[in-house]
Image: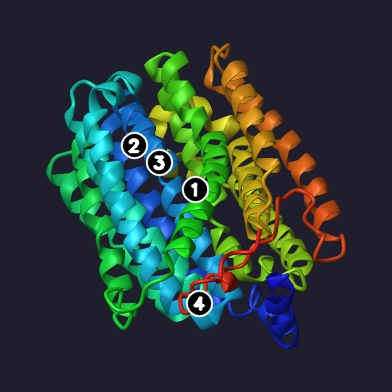
Amino acid sequence: MTTTTAAQDDVPASRSRSAGLLAGGGGIAATMVIANGAFYALTMLSARLLGPAEYSALAAAMNLLLVLSVVSLGVQATAARRIALDATHAQEIEASVLRLSWRTGLGIGLALVVLSPLVKELLRLDDLSPALWLAAATVPSTVVGGYIGILQGERRWRDLSLLYLAASLRLPVGVVLLLWWPDVVTALVAVTLAGFLPILVGRHSLRNTRSGIVSMHRRGIRELVSEAARNSQALLSFMALSNVDVIVARAVLDPHEAGLYAAGAILSKTCAILPQFVVVVAFPSLASHTERIRALTRGLVLTAAIGLAATLGVTLLRPLALSVVGGGEFAEISADLPAFTLLGTCMAMVQLVVYAVLARQGRRSTWLIWICAAVLVLGGSTAATAQSLLVWGLCVTTALLVVLVATSFWIVRRPAPADDADSASDTTSGALDATNATAAPTH
């Protein structure tokens, strides 16, 4: 298979690339922490300025935005995997990925404009303005995935770090706008405007990519779109699982209880996204069968360590943690804050396993995630308090994590090239040779 050839080329550098998870990832880890910290600092500021009832509307909108970002993540994963396995055709892949990113971003934005009345009713918004700004925010959040995936696949950690630093500028933009006019629409305007900053950095980093000159073979483009769609569907299952709880809270709990859960969810989302650098740095190694066992093991250990440290910190500094998520108005949720951090840690570990599945182009595990998301919704719909919804979400996520980890290690330890019983095949972008009209992806 083409994958075997690509993997063999990687063998001499296998150890050094795997070591990048702990060493080379230091810079990208710091900048991702800054970027994600800026995002959640803006979220926390919004909670303080808006209060429980109005903040729950913003939290539901932001979680819907995260769910919609699966297309961006699907394109990112596709670009990173294909470039990591076939660097010789990186320029063809880059040009097609950027074109695909812009077209899908604009398409999703326009679709949400049309569906804005439905979004208004789903999120129980007062008017259409937040729904329309949510549609606008999806454009940059979708487009940026293409730039991230290209830099990730080429392991250009310095350029990727600069992109994430640009993303952190959403905090000062949001602070200025919210202090001027604190409401849901203002927060979404800040997210939209700041979303274009990392795109500008990405365009500068890839300024030598000549999309008008370099192009992939038409069949190769179809395969790129097909893989991106499969990846997006898999990531949609995870995003639905990890964000549907806040939407369920908004739908079934009274506004006060929903606001309490949304505030606690700030911690769970923070703990879920804090070790995200592990996924970014490990993903190229997870795509190679010679490196994926080591990368997955180290990634899970590092993610769990970060999460447990965060849980211990929240337990010991609970008053400080409460002040971070919103202050005295949310005191009723104080005792449950460590459980929220554990929930976020489980989600982070599930996310790493999901990306390991994408890296080997597995498919069957996705259905298990969808089933768990449905179970979370069905059980959560009977919840009467924020605490009961939290307990149910923690039970479902923990059970899913145990099954996925066990299944993934059983699969990846099987000999290559038949190590992916979970997948239809372990395709590589090496078959996407734009210079050979007969070349096509191996399936």
**Image-based side of 135 in relation to 11, left or right:** left
User: Identity of the amino acid at label 2?
Assistant: Ala
* Residue 248 visible within the image: yes
User: Identity of the amino acid at label 4?
Assistant: Asn
Tag 3 residue: 68
Q: Nearer the viewer, mark 3 or mark 1?
A: 1
- Tell which circle, 1 or 2, labels the residue nearer the N-terminal end: 2
Q: Position of residue 10 (x, y in %)?
A: 70, 82
User: Disc 3 on helix, strand or loop?
Assistant: helix
Frontmost residue, 192 versus 332: 192
- Tell which circle, 4 or 2, labels the residue nearer the N-terminal end: 2
Q: Is residue 11 above or below residue 270?
A: below
Tag 4 residue: 436
User: Disc 1 on helix, strand or loop?
Assistant: helix
Q: Are marks 1 and 4 in contact (CB under 8 Å)?
A: no
The outermost residue toward the bottom is 12
The outermost residue toward the front is 438
Label 3 neighbourhood size at 10 Å, few (<14), some (14-19), many (20+)?
A: many
- Tell which circle, 3 or 4, labels the residue nearer the N-terminal end: 3
Tag 1 residue: 229
